[in-house]
Amino acid sequence: MGDDKNTVKILFFGDMVGRPGRSAVRDFMVNPKAFNYKTEPVENPPVDTHFIIANVENASHGFGLTEKNYNELSEYGIDAMTSGNHIWDKKEIFNYINNVEKLLRPINYPNCKFGIGGKIFEKNGVKIGVISVLGRVFMNLVDSQWEVVQEEIKRMKEITPIVVVDFHAEATAEKICFGRFCAELGVSAFFGTHTHVQTADEIILNNMGYISDAGFCGTVDGVIGMEYQTSLNRFLTSIPERYEVADGNIVQINAVEVEIDTDTGYAVAIKRIFCSRNNKEEEESQ
């Protein structure tokens, strides 16, 4: 699955926001060369060459995930879907989350009977453990992630050396500390999510690929994927107002690729991906 037969490449998409985010990921999966890059370009389509994970908690109109959009994203070639604090926003989630194979809710929701927070996937003969986790600093209170994730990593490591964590959290310090904790436990890749702004601190830390935040996929115009005027009104008045997904011609992809040794589970390379495209210009050129 990687350039070397003993490695696998994990491609992780940052928080996908609404239809613009879904469409951007769809187009990127087919033709990454159609995008303009701030980082090193991606030459080949990711489909069939990577194990692909996406954070999807904002994928349906910015909040939650409908079953229709789950199926849509599955058809794009996404192998696993992680989430966060908005996973329950679309109430239909309770009707289907126990019946789907790719979607994870955060593992540290207390006494949760819906969905699972960690799973071992298999692709092309390689087993990959994926864990979705919520932070607790400046977030809705959930169970402590430290003990429950430690136990889940231990369980997975008995089956596969490759374990990936999506830590959906607000505070950078909590991400860094929890990332180091996971590295000591033998995690292969750690992706921070939630703040929607890609950080430039990608590093291999104790054989684990790490980034504080993978960023987001969606419309560049707006405020972290949401419409500007609504965001402004909320800041100016402190009065709750329904957020709307931002609309605009320019969409961006924020993603991270980690290459992992399949024998040891060690990360051997990490690459940050930041690119965009103008959909209007693309349509006019056709």
Image (cartoon, helix red, strand yellow):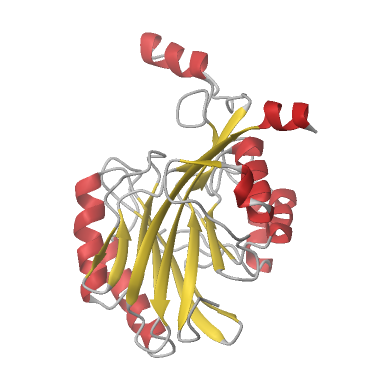
Q: Quadrant of the C terminus?
A: top right
Towards the viewer: 184 or 77: 77
As drawn, 61 above or below 122: above
Towards the viewer: 148 or 283: 283
Residue that protrudes farthest toward the right in the picture: 286
Residue depicted at x 24% and y 60%: 178
As drawn, 59 above or below 104: above
Residue depicted at x 32% and y 79%: 266
Towards the viewer: 138 or 46: 46
Q: Is residue 47 visible?
A: yes
| Image spot of residue 9 (x, y percent) | 48, 71
Q: Quadrant of residue 234?
A: top left
What is the number of callouts on the image?
0
| Image spot of residue 257 (x, y percent) | 44, 61
Residue depicted at x 50% and y 76%: 3
Left of 104 or right of it: where is 28? right
| Image spot of residue 244 (x, y percent) | 58, 25
Q: Is residue 90 visible?
A: no
| Image spot of residue 90 (x, y percent) | 62, 43
As drawn, 32 above or below 89: below
